[in-house]
Image (cartoon, rainbow, N blue to C red):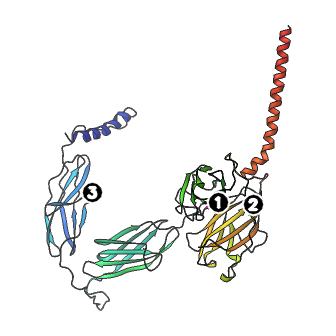
Amino acid sequence: MMYIFPRFIFAFFVLFPSLVFGATTSQFTITVQGGEDLEPPTTPTLLSVTPTAATQIDVVWSVATDNLLLGGYVLLRDGFAIATTTLTSFADTGLLAETLYEYEVYAFDSFYNISTTSNALSTTTPAQPVAPPQATSTENGSSGTLVFRLLNLDITPDTNSALFEWETSMPARYALRWGRNNSFDEGYIINDIYRKEQQTLITDLEPGTTYLYELIGYAANGRVLELRSGQFTTIARENLTPANVRNFTATPLQNDVRLSYITPPSVPNAVVRIVRSHLGYPLDPYDGAVVYEGSALTFLDSGAFSNYSTLYYTAFVISNDGSVSSGAVAKATKRATSTGTGEPLEPEVVPEEPIIELPYFNFSTDAVTLNQGDKTFSFKSENIELLENEAFIISIKKEALPDNLKSIIVTLVDPTNPNRSYSFLLRINKAGDAYEAVIAPLQASGPSRIQVEIFDYERSVIGRYRQPVMFIPSVGSVAEVMFPDKLVEAVRPFFSTISLLLLALVLLFFILYRRSKATEDNR
């Protein structure tokens, strides 16, 4: 009875296509075999059992057939099942040296019918090698014994993985280690199966990154050889770092903080994760409390000021492939007074802080660059002009910065309102040679200013630099595109005028209606 249900399911999926498609065409005939399958597969033949090493025997058998669907094979060693597989070979490892082993195999189908057991073959594993044999050269340059060596090696890197394929002159197991330096500390694979042809896939690699590797081979006769050491580079992703959100603000209310931003159009289906901390701006998506994750443009952090009066927020854009932006930052400070209505208080006026140089580190503002398309400017450039409708990258060379820095914050003044600004974190790029942030298109033209602040681990500013920038309309642009809050201010008079006109029309209609009714009553 235990086989009725799966056999019914099988019969249904075999009969159902004939009921659906049989009426639509007469160009072919479908033969349906209903009922129970009681026919077992044919018996496979054990072809060879080869002692490859003192601890391994390779077993090979022939293909079995079935009237419906072959399920696989069960391999027996000394009468006990040791493997179930769909292949026709198996490497039996972990054996004892100088030991006799006997093997058999049988096949089974999808209805759990099994074939008869195959012929039996026996073999004895060799003794453990005492010392590796030494190769002796002959007059024609060939070796008197088989030399253990690497015949070929192919490495196929991808963005996050690399496929290793190689062949040795004799069966061998291997150990593969890799890392970004010669300590090979990022991963390793050890394989105990002796084969001439091997392959393995290493994963969890960083795109566009160079790795060092070391491949060690262990032959069955005891020889140990460094087959190859070298390096490979994974494929770099295009646009690896997504653009940040723009206009990220944290507005303090009575006991809450209202967060708002605009997602970058260059990152479709972007997810924004907002992280909060009272110790400073979170430097990565896990450095603090995650208060929001989603695609909404506003979020209310309720009860944010319950424990701390000053809070730091970072908004990270996470693209579909898992890449993370450098982060847009905003600070919220609870005011001493409250309106009691939950409405935003007047913004606090913060005096502009002075420029701070880094002379002790020989820092040059040439190291701060702005890149947009094929244009590159430094903080020493004059008349910097950036297009308003294209993203740009701000970058600082790692070698130009001190080792004790904690974070780098870039602040961009709103071209439409010099009293409003937005800030971003700079994070180390995938190449590890620069701190960068991708700034989404501003969609606003006018004069602006970019400020770079470098903080140490004491959260003290050790460097501050400013550079004026002009954002210009792109070719063919006919109208200024404003920031959302300024756009509301601009269109409010227009909507007020429309409201007055509508009210006047309603009043006029009411007067005409009353006059019409009065005329009818007089009749």
Residue 86: numbered disc: 3
First reached walking from the N terminus: tag 2 or tag 1: 1
- Residue 337 in view here: yes
Out of 405 and 311, give the one closest to the viewer: 311
User: Which residue corresponds to mark 1?
Assistant: 330
Whole-angstrom CA distance, mark 2 to mark 1, is: 15 Å
User: In x, y percent, where is residue 399?
Assistant: 61, 78
First reached walking from the N terminus: tag 3 or tag 2: 3
> For the residue marked with disc 1, what is the amino acid?
Ala
Answer with left or right where residue 160 lies relative to residue 14.
Answer: right
Q: Looking at the image, is mark 2 or mark 1 nearer the viewer? A: 2
> For the residue marked with disc 2, what is the amino acid?
Val
Q: Quadrant of residue 471?
A: bottom right
Q: Quadrant of residue 222?
A: bottom left
Out of 332 and 432, give the one closest to the viewer: 332
Whole-angstrom CA distance, mark 3 to mark 2, is: 74 Å
User: In x, y percent, where is residue 83?
Assistant: 23, 60
User: Which residue corresponds to mark 2?
Assistant: 349
Secondary element at image label 2: loop
- Residue 26 in view here: no
Q: Furthest residue to the top?
A: 523
Out of 490 and 50, give the one closest to the viewer: 490
Residue 212: numbered disc: none
Disc 3 crowd, CA 10 A, few/some/many (<14, 14-19, 20+): few
Answer with left or right where residue 25 lies relative to residue 384.
Answer: left
Q: Furthest residue to the bottom?
A: 139
Q: Are marks 3 and 2 in contact (CB under 8 Å)?
A: no
